Amino acid sequence: MSRTRTALLAAMALAAGATGTAFAVDPGSAGIAAVPCTVDYKIQNQWSTGFTAAVTLTNNSAAKSSWSLKWSYAGNQKVTSGWNAKISQSGAAVTAANETYNAQLATGGSVSFGFQGSYSGSNAIPATFTLDGVTCNVDGGPGGPTDPPDPGGPANRVNNPYEGAKVYVNPEWSANAAAEPGGSRVANQPTGVWLDRIAAINGAGGKMGLRDHLDEALRQKGSGELVVQFVIYNLPGRDCSALASNGELKADEIGRYKTDYIDPIKAILADPKYASLRIVTTVEIDSLPNLVTNTGSRPTAVPQCDVMKANGNYVKGVGYALNKLGDVPNVYNYVDAGHHGWIGWDDNFGPTATLMKEAATAEGATVNDVHGFITNTANYSALKENNFTINDTVAGKSVRESKWVDWNRYLDELSYAQAFRGQLVSAGFDSNVGMLIDTSRNGWGGTARPTGPGATTSVDTYVDGGRYDRRFNAGNWCNQSGAGLGERPKAAPAAGIDAYVWMKPPGESDGASKQIPNDEGKGFDRMCDPTYTGNPRNNNNMSGALPDAPLSGHWFSAQFRQLMQNAYPPLS
């Protein structure tokens, strides 16, 4: 939902029954005595059970080496978390005290902090604020404060967030990579941070949480621009056609998805502390395409995907995420768009774009909440097949008739992403919409990389002998044997492409090769078992998976070493 902050706040204040969102006095107004401070209290976001607020305190008296601002609520509001101040609450009384880094408050100086809270019924603005025991705000002073437009608001987002910017290096992934022999060659590459369960927001299993990553991103940013990448990945009934990364939320838990997952993420991303970052979100991979290809009477249909199509919670969840996250002025939403070996067929291509439009206009979202789309996330499809084209004919047969291509119109990710971008614009998305391609594991280099087309004895020998992608089938997705690191992340590498990215951190498993009990909501999928002979979704081919893989998201040393060995371009 793209609205100016002023309009949004006004609407929320009315919804809360408040007559305004700020209290301040202009100490320079004629006939009005100067007051020791002004307080600007704004409700930034509000939902049925909670809200976030931003407070700016301006000191009009003597300089202070520490400060403490107090107020009381008339209702049942409770502060649940805060930032840029130490916030405590006793009954209705709230105290916000300085942190060590913002204790100094000069005469005429200001300090800002924020918090998230809960409430029921009304959410009225506090009537009185005191700074160090002195009342410092007057309601309804003349020439009341204005709310200037946010710099970098939705209308001011840059066309391509990756251009002219560094990209965040996750120190946890970097440490894992550097610990492997030769891993230091890529340990400084930027990767996505996966928020794949509610606990990941605050940090699960000793790992960094969302705010930890954002704070580290500020440190890495320095004086330039920096992109930090997050994968939003916790829909109800997640991954309906697979088991390896099934999520924690049941098919009908759309309410929990909204209140326990998206709302807290939005509240953290909206903290003014992080307003200088360019925050890229990859929204719910493997969700919407499943509703096209794995439902109904198709041989690839899965009962759970029919459930998710019928209850609408994939569409609702994606729409809600786009709506809420799109309200944050420095967030750039990119929706997952599958890959060429999934959506490239005629009966999938157009319907998927249409479904993307449906989701982008659900739950209050608009197409303006979508900055772009991402393909090949956590997949292995080659970026560009150079040894044959879709128009080639061999032994009287089109390349499209080969077993590998199987009538698909696209051979690789670059051609697919560029074509699908055009389809998305036709479906109603902005003509400047950008594409990302995940190149983290699609290099397919090493000694087995073909240097030219295969023999022309048949269309299959021609294609199989020349293709870089060495999977048994493009439907194979789990820990693929022979894969290599692909193009290193870079901005604006081709027409319509905002960036090549490593959204999937190389070396993190796609799924366990055998059943492993866990408390992460992750199941066992036979596509991760190297002995599995396949199903209709991979034309009943062998899975091609590596053995001895850990749970999805866990470090898989053998895979990482293979990826480095087979990297293309090769590692130096």
Image: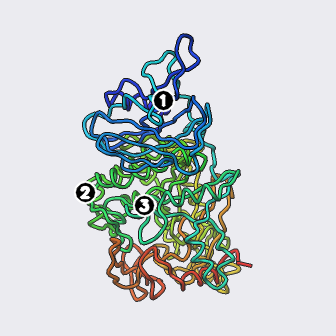
Left or right of 441 on screen, residue 346:
left
Q: Which mark is residue 94?
A: none
Position of 41 relative to 339 (above/below): above
The reply to whether callout 1 and callout 3 are in contact (CB within 8 Å) is no
The reply to whether callout 1 and callout 2 are in contact (CB within 8 Å) is no
The image quadrant that residue 299 belongs to is bottom left
Examine the rendering and report whether any part of residue 395 can be seen.
no
Left or right of 58 on screen, residue 347:
left
For disc 1, the marked residue is 6
Name the foreground residue: 296 vs 505. 505
Position of 200 relative to 218 (above/below): below
Q: Amino acid at mark 2?
A: Asp
Q: Amino acid at mark 3?
A: Asn
**Structural distance between the alpha carbons of marks 1 and 3:** 30 Å
N-term-proximal mark, 3 vs 2 = 3
Does dot 1 land on a helix, a strand or a loop? helix
Examine the rendering and report whether any part of residue 113 can be seen.
yes
**Structural distance between the alpha carbons of marks 3 and 2:** 24 Å
N-term-proximal mark, 1 vs 3 = 1
Q: Amino acid at mark 1?
A: Thr
Image position, residue 220 (x, y; %) = 65, 59
Q: Nearer the viewer, mark 1 or mark 3?
A: 3
Position of 49 relative to 17 (above/below): below
Colour approach in the figure: rainbow
For disc 2, the marked residue is 252
Name the foreground residue: 545 vs 123. 123
Q: Badge 3 local density, few (<14 within 10 Å), some, or many (20+)?
A: some
Q: Badge 2 local density, few (<14 within 10 Å), some, or many (20+)?
A: some
Does dot 3 land on a helix, a strand or a loop? helix
Q: Badge 1 local density, few (<14 within 10 Å), some, or many (20+)?
A: some
For disc 3, the marked residue is 202
